[in-house]
Image (cartoon, grey):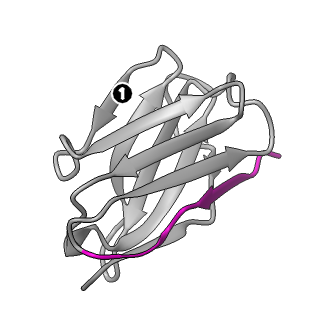
């Protein structure tokens, strides 16, 4: 069984930046699809960004232009940098992965809390 462990969350002031990391318990080179999702209080979980094994990246409109997703298959990690943070970015951020190109997400992390507040 694969474990995904997120880190890097915390309290950040509006306009600040942070870098989230996701560490996998085994090689991530077999994961075609890796992504970040987030869930704000009282809201459904939403997709934030994706990086494939190609690699190809895509971002939700809400973070496009102020975020950068990356993966390091040699270190079995995936990262997400978020800049110009806004209060509406406050959420629990989850790492997700699956091996095939298509299909449901098979692996989820436990989440890391990001709070944007003055």
Q: Position of residue 66 (x, y in %)?
A: 22, 46
Task: Tell me where the magenta segment starts and ends, as one range.
Answer: 1-13
Report whether 66 appears left or right of 75: left
Residue at image position (45%, 49%) is 36
Residue lying at 53% horizontally and 19% vertically, measured from the top left: 53
Image location (x, y in percent) of residue 52: 48, 24
- Examine the rendered structure and indicate whether residue 62 appears above or below residue 41: above
Report which residue position mark 1 lands on.
Answer: 57
10 is within the stretch colored magenta? yes
In this rendering, the answer to whether 109 lies above or below 28 is: below
Q: Left or right: where does residue 40 sit relative to residue 73? A: left
Q: Is residue 92 above or below residue 98?
A: below
Q: Quadrant of the C terminus?
A: bottom left
Viewer-nearest residue: 106 or 4: 4
Measuring from the top left, give residue 80's x and y in whole percent: 44, 46
Q: Please report the residue visible at 48 percent of the width from the left and 14 percent of the height from the top.
A: 54
């Amino acid at each position: 069984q694969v474990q995904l462990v997120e880190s890097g969350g915390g309290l950040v002031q509006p306009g600040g930046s942070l870098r989230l990391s996701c560490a996998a318990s085994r090689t991530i080179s077999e994961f075609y699809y890796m992504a970040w999702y987030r869930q704000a209080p009282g809201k459904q979980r939403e997709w934030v960004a994706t990086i494939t094994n190609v690699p190809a990246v895509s971002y939700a409109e809400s973070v496009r232009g102020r975020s950068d997703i990356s993966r390091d298959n040699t270190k079995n990690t995936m990262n997400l940098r978020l800049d110009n943070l806004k209060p509406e970015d406050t959420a629990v951020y989850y790492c997700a992965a699956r091996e095939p190109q298509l299909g449901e997400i098979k692996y989820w992390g436990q989440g890391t809390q990001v709070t944007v507040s003055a």
